[in-house]
Image: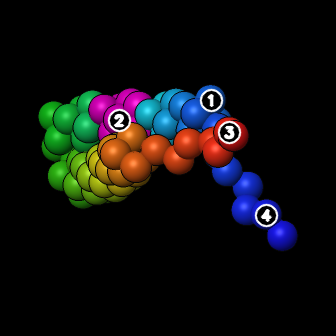
Amino acid sequence: MALEQKSPASSSTTSHQMHTKAAEHCDAASKAHKEAAKQHESGDAKQAGNHAAVAHAHTLQANDQSEMVIKNMAHPVTSSKK
């Protein structure tokens, strides 16, 4: 049974997908921070805190995606052509 090797193109696609997911989490964090600011300005500290927590969670997820991209780029899997 042979192990399937990732080609450089498939590795690039995976990295692209991880970058895209990280960017989406950054966008979501930004929106949540903006909503937290609105809630804080209106005097609703509880809702501001909830939105800040959501923003924090998205920031952590974006960081995780970024770390996966870095690891993927540091150790690319190449195809074995003879």
Query: Disc 3 residue type?
Result: Lys
Q: Residue furthest front?
A: 82
Q: Earlier in the sequence, mark 3 or mark 1?
A: 1
- Tag count: 4
Magenta range is 21-31
Query: Pointer 4: what residue?
Result: 2
**Mark 2 and mark 1: Cα distance apart in space:** 26 Å
The residue carrying mark 2 is 26
Circle 3 SS class: loop
Whether 25 is among the magenta residues is yes
- Residue drawn at x 20%, y 35% is 37
CB within 8 Å, label 4 to label 3: no
- In the depicted view, which residue is nearer to us: 52 or 15? 15
Secondary structure character of the magenta stretch overall: helix
Question: Which residue appears at 68% of the width and 39% of the height?
Answer: 81
Which tag, 4 or 3, sits closer to the chain's start?
Answer: 4
Q: CA distance from mark 4 to mark 1?
A: 20 Å
- Mark-to-mark CA distance, 3 and 1: 14 Å
Q: Amino acid at mark 2?
A: Cys
Label 4 sits on a secondary structure element that is loop
Q: CA distance from mark 4 to mark 2?
A: 39 Å
Mark number for residue 9? 1
